[in-house]
Image (cartoon, rainbow, N blue to C red):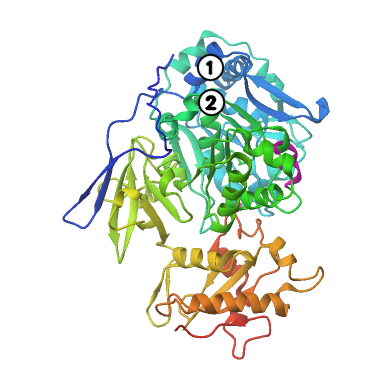
Amino acid sequence: MSVLTRPAARRKLGPGPVRFARRADGCLMVTPEGTLGAYPRRLTERLEHWAAVAPDRTLIARRDPALGGDWRRITYAEMLSQVRAVGQALLDRGLSADRPLAILSGNCLDQAVLTLAALHVGVPLAPVSPSYSLLARDFAKLRHCLGLLTPGLVFANDGTRFAEAIAAVVPAGTELVVCGGDPGRAATPFAALLAAAPTPAVEAAAAAVDPDAPAKILFTSGSTGQPKGVVNTQRMLCSNQQMLLEAFPFMGEEPPVLLDWLPWHHTFGGNHNTGIVLYNGGTLYMDDGRPVPGGFAESLRNLREIATSIYFNVPRGFEEVAHHLRTDAALRRTFFSKVRMMFYSAAGLPQHIWDELDAMALAERGERIPMITGLGATETAPFAICVREDHSASGVVGLPVPGVELKLAPVGDKMEARVRGPSITPGYWRNPAATAKAFDEEGWYCFGDALVPLDPDDLHKGFRFDGRITEDFKLSTGTWVSVGPLRAKLIAALAPYVKDVVLAAPDRDELAAILLPEPEAVARIVPQGEDAAMHPGLRAELAAKLAALAKTATGSSQHVARAALLTAPLSLDAGEITDKGSINQRAVLERRAALVEDLYADPPPPHVIIIGGAA
């Protein structure tokens, strides 16, 4: 049974004290003071602990139509029993690093059991994005992932939904497990795995788990090529949860309650959030809603019932929440009643949404709720750099968390964030070339993100995001455009009418922008049925805001000369948005090449907004 170090409570959330040192080569080294507390060798030690301490507490729950929409719950004791049974079934099949477990379907209770069972007995598992099966037509990414994995077992909760992908990609000799439906071929029911009788081999396998062996393979989105399989070890998962506990000690004082929709094939939902619940003896309510048009009603239903202690979401989700909190007093009361922290990731949160949530929290509870974010990656498990509560603002990412060292290395005129520690990946699954490219000559993982001090005179306030080094581009004049910071300025300047911006384009004489509208705000100006891109009132508002921003521009790399509103929805299937709702700038520019040409046409078409020169 594991023994954890419980950190002394701090009044403010976030990383503890750090030390700074400047090296002769120009690198700035940032090192947390003190050492990281003890953590388990494998994650399911925490399941064993809580099954003994609080056996009847709900670990995970999901609404079930068979129960009239009530919650189907799995307690800690029930989960450990099911994990041991399924762990035996996995051992019986001889699964290993050569024949790992692949999961095709989205979040479900059976997947939770299967995931923990694999972790318990040391079988590597790979949850693959369901979009590769359900949205793609050629199954190229799915075929690539399974070819790289060579799985010994493939799981899909609904055989009927995944039948086409299974027929196209899963080899006939690979065992298939389904919970129901007709996959069009022989399949093992998941109930058969649950029916396995555990033998001493299960606990022997658990005791023999190597904390540095692959535990999960999480695939990156593959927006610029085929997905890469990021190796996640037990040491990564466990040390990262201890880092979270030391940054947010209230999680160890009262078991956290989460309502979460984030997908488990991503590190935010599948490592960060589910891990917080298990590590600290909390409860996860699975949310079948999504922050997309027509998909948020189920989230609202759940939020009216479940008072969370931590609320995680992507920025688009917080925009949806803020919109409904404005007019729903009962929702506000429940939402703010127990929440100790809000946390966003995947993209920047517009400051006006942040400010609105602060105002509603003050009115409802008499205090602001800390809004926390940071910088992490699938390769960092993901918690690595995090804001301090006192210096949290849009665009700020903070300082390294306990146990993680940060190196800011000069790359051109920017400083790239690089990290090392027990939570950093050893590399990519069966891809030594990608592994070598991801680390510098000293073995530090390279984020590809640039950071700058929030306050050059006080580095202890932390750092802010200074753009993706690979996203930046040059104008035809040779001037570099720093996409990340400029995009953030534009979103702030164009609030509340614009929720995101895509900047165009390399090798042009001047900058242009594709504006993604915020529907609710736009609807206050543009009557239903009218083309927002051509509406004179909205165009005038946007032009005035862009002209005001242009007066502050210090040169062509800061001056957006033309803009156009994109009213057609972005496509997940085409890669314009990720499963988490963030924008893939490169994919948008490629798919909207005609709009980019319109932006630079001479003379420009009527839907293009022309902005005057910089002062």
Q: Which residue is labeled 1 in the image? A: 50
Please tell me whether residue 396 is drawn above or below residue 596 in the rendered image: above
- Tell me the residue that label 2 is attached to: 278
State whether residue 15 appears in this view: yes
Which residue range is magenta in the image?
Answer: 296-303
Distance from disc 2 to disc 1, alpha carbons, whole Å, reads: 8 Å
Callouts 2 and 1 close, C-beta under 8 Å? yes
Secondary structure mainly formed by the magenta segment? helix
Residue 492 position (above or below residue 29): below
Q: Quadrant of the C terminus?
A: bottom left
Residue type, mark 1 in image? Trp
Classify 10 Å Cα crowding around label 2: few (below 14), some (14-19), many (20 and above).
Answer: many
Name the residue located 56 percent from the left edge and 52 percent from the top edge.
Answer: 354
Q: Nearer the viewer, residue 373 or 72?
A: 373
Viewer-closest of 437 and 254? 254
Q: How far from the left and from the top, in percent, is residue 314?
A: 58, 48
